[in-house]
Image (cartoon, helix red, strand yellow):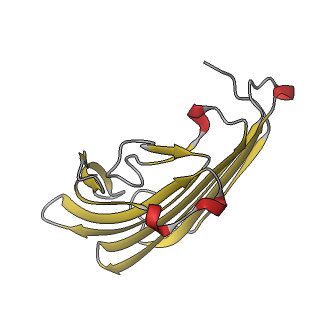
Amino acid sequence: HYIESGPGFAFQVDTRNSIFFPTQGFCLTGKSSFQHKAFGSDYNFGRHEYDIRYFFGISGDHVMAFQFRFKMAHGEVPLESLSGIGGDDLMRGYIENRYLDKSSLAAQAEYRFPLVWRFAGTIFAGAGEVQPSLKRYNPSDLHPAAGAGLRLIIDRNEHITARVDFGWNDTGSMSI
């Protein structure tokens, strides 16, 4: 176990028409923190994360969603604070933080559509990469992921759902 401590800041610009089921708008979030021994941290390092999401409705409850996330850490970065790709939000074909390094880039597109009664579906595809520095990124190192999901709409007014996603990665493995 170790201690991370230091100053930081965060911001958000959000024009989405709903936080649960946006059909238009974008959301940009960013945060940076600077851990330092002078503030009681066991390590000296910085960490930055920027996430942008864009939504547009095609018709009715048919929606396209796009996401791009960039994470970067520098300095004496402990393992638990490295930047990763994979998880239930972005790059769903991989387990959480399947790949780790000092920086990560990932992008995803998703199509959301109604099915029957309170059920809806989604199909998604994305790609991401981790590297020790920004200079090392190479399109041939991208890790693709794709899949489909099923949603049960619990609250029709707010469009709150229970979900299950099936994602596949470049090794042929599936994550649920």
Report the front residue among 166 and 150: 166
- Residue shown at the point (21%, 68%) measured from the top left: 114
Residue 169 pos. (x, y %): 30, 54
Quick check: 119 above or below 173?
Answer: below
Residue 76 pos. (x, y %): 72, 35
Report the front residue among 144 and 21: 144
Residue 98 pos. (x, y %): 42, 43
- Residue shown at the point (41%, 42%) measured from the top left: 96
Determine the image quadrant of residue 112.
Answer: bottom left
- Residue shown at the point (37%, 73%) measured from the top left: 64
Quick check: 77 above or below 10?
Answer: above
- Residue shown at the point (45%, 42%) measured from the top left: 97
Q: Which residue is the extreme one toward the bottom?
A: 58
The quarter of the image holding the N terminus is top right
The quarter of the image holding the C terminus is top left
Quick check: 101 above or below 3?
Answer: below
Q: Which residue is the extreme one toward the top?
A: 1
